Image (cartoon, rainbow, N blue to C red):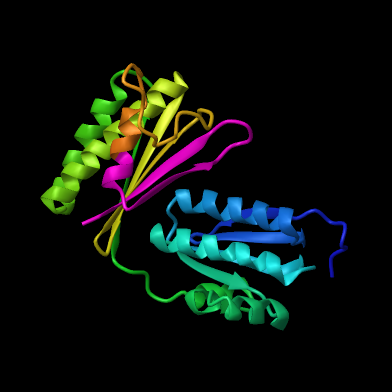
C-alpha cells in the first residue's frame, strides 16, 4: 500500500506488440487523476493499438476521482485505441462499473491479463508524415494526404474535407511555431478519419470563434470546426508542445 502523501507518478512502457502500458504509482486524488488523464491523452496521440493503465500500485482516497476515466474512455474510442485497466481492488472496479466504464474496457489483475482480454483490434489503417516547419509544410501535407486518401480509397467527400482540415491545422502550426518539426498522423477506422497535427509550439491560436473582418489569421479554425465531428487540443510537452486533432465522419 502506498502512502497517502505520495504524489501520483505515471511510468510509460511500450511493448513489442505496440501496446502502451501506463503504470501509475502513488495517491490517485484529483490532481493525480488529472495527471493520469493527461498521460492517457498523450499516449492516444501516438495512436497505439491499445493502452493498458495499471492501477494496482495506487491508493484511491475518494472514488469520485475515477470519473476522470470517462473522458479517457471517450477519447480512446474516438481515436480508435482500445483501453484496458489493471486492478484487483473491488472498490475501484465497482465504481468504474457503476459509471458504465468498465463495460468498455478490458480488465485484468495483471498487465498480461488485461492485454490478452483486449481482443482483436478493429480493422484500421494508419500513416504518419514528418515535415519541417516552414512555408512549404501545408502544401506538402496536403499532397501527402491526397496520395494517402487515394491509396486507402477514402470516400471522395471525406478526402476533400480532410485536405481542407489538414491544410488549416498545418498552416496554424507554421504561423504559431516558426521552427522545429510538424508530425501528422492519420488513422481511418470504421468510417471515421482522425487527423492529428503535433508541433513544438505553445497552446495559442486555437479558438474556433468567428474572426474580426480585419483579422489576419483565425479563419481556418472556423472551417475545421464546421467540417469536423469533434476537434480539440492536447498538451504533449512541459511548457511547450501540443497536438491538435480532428475527427471527420465519412
225 or 236: nearer the viewer: 225
Q: In this view, does 111 lie to the left or right of 178?
A: right
Can residue 109 be seen by looking at this rendering?
Answer: no
165 or 142: nearer the viewer: 165
Question: Based on the displayed image, in which of its 4 quarters is residue 209 positioned?
Answer: top left
Q: In percent of the image, x 40 and y 45: which residue is there?
A: 245
Can residue 103 be seen by looking at this rendering?
Answer: yes
Q: As displayed, is residue 65 above or below residue 43? A: below
Looking at this view, name the residue that lies furthest to the left.
Answer: 156
Q: Percent from the top left, x then y, of residue 113?
A: 57, 78
Q: Percent from the top left, x then y, of residue 156?
A: 11, 49
Picture quarter with the N terminus: bottom right
Picture quarter with the C terminus: bottom left
Q: In percent of the image, x 75 and y 55: which residue is there?
A: 8
The residues colored magenta run: 224-250
112 or 7: nearer the viewer: 7
Q: Is residue 232 magenta?
A: yes
Q: Is residue 174 left or right of residue 110?
A: left
Q: As displayed, is residue 60 above or below residue 40? A: below
Question: Based on the displayed image, in which of its 4 quarters is residue 13 positioned?
Answer: bottom right
Amino acid at each position: 500500500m502506498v502512502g497517502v502523501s505520495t504524489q501520483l507518478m505515471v511510468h510509460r512502457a511500450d511493448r513489442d506488440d505496440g501496446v502502451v502500458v501506463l503504470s501509475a504509482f502513488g495517491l490517485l486524488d484529483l490532481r493525480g487523476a488529472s495527471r493520469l488523464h493527461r498521460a492517457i491523452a498523450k499516449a492516444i496521440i501516438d495512436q497505439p493499438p491499445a493502452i493498458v493503465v495499471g492501477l494496482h500500485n495506487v491508493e484511491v482516497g475518494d472514488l469520485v476521482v475515477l470519473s476522470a476515466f470517462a473522458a479517457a474512455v471517450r477519447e480512446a474510442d474516438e481515436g480508435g485505441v482500445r483501453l484496458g485497466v489493471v486492478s484487483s481492488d473491488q472498490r475501484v472496479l465497482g465504481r468504474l462499473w457503476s459509471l458504465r466504464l468498465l463495460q468498455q474496457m478490458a480488465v485484468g489483475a495483471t498487465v498480461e491479463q488485461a492485454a490478452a482480454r483486449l481482443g482483436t483490434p478493429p480493422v484500421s489503417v494508419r500513416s504518419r508524415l514528418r515535415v519541417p516547419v516552414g512555408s512549404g509544410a501545408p502544401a506538402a501535407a496536403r499532397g501527402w494526404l491526397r496520395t494517402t486518401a487515394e491509396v486507402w480509397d477514402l470516400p471522395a467527400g471525406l478526402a476533400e474535407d480532410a485536405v481542407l482540415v489538414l491544410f488549416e491545422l498545418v498552416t496554424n502550426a507554421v504561423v504559431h511555431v516558426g521552427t522545429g518539426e510538424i508530425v501528422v498522423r492519420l488513422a481511418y477506422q470504421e468510417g471515421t478519419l482522425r487527423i492529428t497535427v503535433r508541433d513544438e509550439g505553445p497552446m495559442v491560436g486555437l479558438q474556433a470563434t468567428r474572426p474580426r473582418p480585419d483579422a489576419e489569421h483565425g479563419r481556418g479554425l472556423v472551417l475545421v470546426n464546421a467540417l469536423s465531428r469533434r476537434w480539440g487540443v492536447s498538451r504533449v510537452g512541459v511548457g511547450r508542445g501540443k497536438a491538435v486533432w480532428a475527427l471527420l465522419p465519412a
